[in-house]
Amino acid sequence: MNNLLTWCLHAGALIGAGILSAQLFRWHHPQSRLRFFQILLVASLLLPILEPWRAQPASPILRIVPYVTASPAVSGSAAAASFAWEPALLFVLAAGVLVRIVLLGVRLSQLRGLRRRGRTIRIDGVVGVEVREVRGLNGPAAFGWLCPVILLPAGMPDGPLRDAALRHELQHVLRRDWLENMLERAAASILWFHPVICGCSSAST
């Protein structure tokens, strides 16, 4: 647990310094800014490899002591003092990871449902990417890595607006943004308890 807390502090300091540097140098180029923060994320995840881990001290040798009946007040204070808070905290952290992973799986299942509901359309000049029209879809979306698909709202009129939306989603497919997005979401699901991850998640929503 001490190693985990130490890593949280160091990773927070590293990412905080990166955010401050980006603001001071007015680094507003979207692609460069994205790569910079992705490098910061990877560096934060690699900190446990670069830093020495402190081993848990060995448990003292158990000694047999005579059994003494204590008063209820003394027994209650001893039980509170002997409460194993570290396993309880680890259980909460693991439960949070499980919940985040389940929610991510539900989101992926919803996207697959939209893909099945959609109707395949053919657009001149679009090769290697499936395009589907989906009723009830609020806006264009692209997902998938090996078999990418672009979803367009049904009834979207053919014209400059549709062409611009299609070009935008095609750029996401060509840059493999879906894979990077999934890796980032997986990291955020595992490290959901870190204050920096919570801040980034709330800002993105």
Image: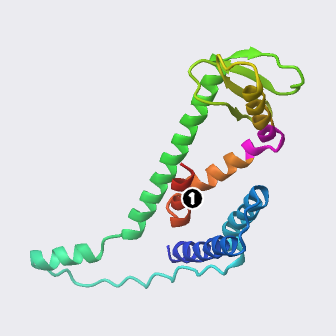
User: What element does badge 1 sit on?
Assistant: helix
What residue is drawn where x is 65% and y is 16%? 155
**Span shown in magenta:** 171-179
Residue 75: percent from left, percent from top: 16, 75
The answer to whether residue 15 is above or below residue 125 is below
Taking depth in this image into account, of 38 and 169 the one nearest to the observer is 169
Q: Which residue is identified by label 1?
A: 200
Report if residue 117 lies within the magenta region. no
Amino acid type of the residue that numbered disc 1 sits on in the rendered structure: Cys
* Res 170 → quadrant: top right
Drawn side of residue 79 relative to residue 169, left or right: left
What residue is drawn where x is 63% and y is 55%? 187
Q: Is residue 145 visible?
A: no
* Res 38 → quadrant: bottom right
Taking depth in this image into account, of 5 and 42 the one nearest to the observer is 42
Q: Is residue 187 visible?
A: yes
Drawn side of residue 76 relative to residue 64, left or right: left
* Res 201 → quadrant: bottom right
Residue 175: percent from left, percent from top: 82, 44
